[in-house]
């Protein structure tokens, strides 16, 4: 078994060289380490463990992991000790300033506790999922190697953005390694909200447009009819030899000539009105008003547009 004196040497070297400022985190952590070493040599492993933990929180140097491993082993926390030993070896063994003595100390401590604990080999998907063991967060799965646990049942859980939380129950056996697979189920994306197309605006009602267009057509048809009748009268006028009939036809032709001209003119006015109404009734909200006023002496009509 490794002597306490050797442990003390390892602990005292954990934070050298120290910062000059007395109140710096590194200096305060060094004082806590000194206290922890003294407590450990006095056989007060629980107090030493608390001092080492406080020092690591102040200044999380990987060198302190060896101190924590030794104190955890003395308290019977074998799984915690193995985890600290392994992290120390992975993070510090390649550095020349660590020294073979401390590396050997960590390897010996790890070999001593391994037969007393179980090992869980994690296979977590996605690899950036945050893993928790028995409710304690351990960090992303990609940074975790084999988990050292006390024999018995343990619950592993994992969370990741965009995935449903997952958990698995593992039964650890001392001296053996168990594979634990935990694949999180991706949360399906929410269906996109249906795009509701705006209903096309209702077709404008062009009531007065069609009234004017119908009137134009009626006037035009009437004018054509009168013009054709006037032509037939004119043909008869050229062929007749009767004087009275000639005078009668000449008067009829004159009247109908005036009539079909009036009808054609009215058809043109109605057509222009229809075109104007077509534009105004189809633009935004156009309101067309038509009014009539009748008295004993006269009849009046008026029309107006509201824009």
Image (spheres, grey):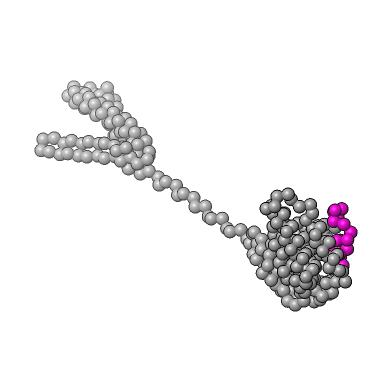
Residue 43 placement, left or right of 299: right
Q: Position of residue 19 (x, y in %)?
A: 74, 50
Residue nearer the viewer, 216 or 235 = 216
Query: Quick check: is 13 in the magenta stretch?
Result: no
Task: In the rendered view, tell whether residue 105 sits above or below residue 171.
Answer: above
Q: Looking at the image, which residue is at 72% across and 64% down?
A: 51
Q: Position of residue 70 (x, y in %)?
A: 80, 67
Q: Quadrant of the N terminus?
A: bottom right
- Give the magenta part as a residue range: 94-108
Please identify the quarter of the rendering in which residue 136 is found: bottom right
Residue 159 visible in image? yes
Q: Position of residue 220 (x, y in %)?
A: 31, 33
Task: In the rendered view, tell whether residue 145 sits above or below residue 154.
Answer: above
Residue 139 visible in image? no
Q: Quadrant of the C terminus?
A: top left
Please identify the quarter of the rendering in which residue 104 is found: bottom right
């Amino acid at each position: 078994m490794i002597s306490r004196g050797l442990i003390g040497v390892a602990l005292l070297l954990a934070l050298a060289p120290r910062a000059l400022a007395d109140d710096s985190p590194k200096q305060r952590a060094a004082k806590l380490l000194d206290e922890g070493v003294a407590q450990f040599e006095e056989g007060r492993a629980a107090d030493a463990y608390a001092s080492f933990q406080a020092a690591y929180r102040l200044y999380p140097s990987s060198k302190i992991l060896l101190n924590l491993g030794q104190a955890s082993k003395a308290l019977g926390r074998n799984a915690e000790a193995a985890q600290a030993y392994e992290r120390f070896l992975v993070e510090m063994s390649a550095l020349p300033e660590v020294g073979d003595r401390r590396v050997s100390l960590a390897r010996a401590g790890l070999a001593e506790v391994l037969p007393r604990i179980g090992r869980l080999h994690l296979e977590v998907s996605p690899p950036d999922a945050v893993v928790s063991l028995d409710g304690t967060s351990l960090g992303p799965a990609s940074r975790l190697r084999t988990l050292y646990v006390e024999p018995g049942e343990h619950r592993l859980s994992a969370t990741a953005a965009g995935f449903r939380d997952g958990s698995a129950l593992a039964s650890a056996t001392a001296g053996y390694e168990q594979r634990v697979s935990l694949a999180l189920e991706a949360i399906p994306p929410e269906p996109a909200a249906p795009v509701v197309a705006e209903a096309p605006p209702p077709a404008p009602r062009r009531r007065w447009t069609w009234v004017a267009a119908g009137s134009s057509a009626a006037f035009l048809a009437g004018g054509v009819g009168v013009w054709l009748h006037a032509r037939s009268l004119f043909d008869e006028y050229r062929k007749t030899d009767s004087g009275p009939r000639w005078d009668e036809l000449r008067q009829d032709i004159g009247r109908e000539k005036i009539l079909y001209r009036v009808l054609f003119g009215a058809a043109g006015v109605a057509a222009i009105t229809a075109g104007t109404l077509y534009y105004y009734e189809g633009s935004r909200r156009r309101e067309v008003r038509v009014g009539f006023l009748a008295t004993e002496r006269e009849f009046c009509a008026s029309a107006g547009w509201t824009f």
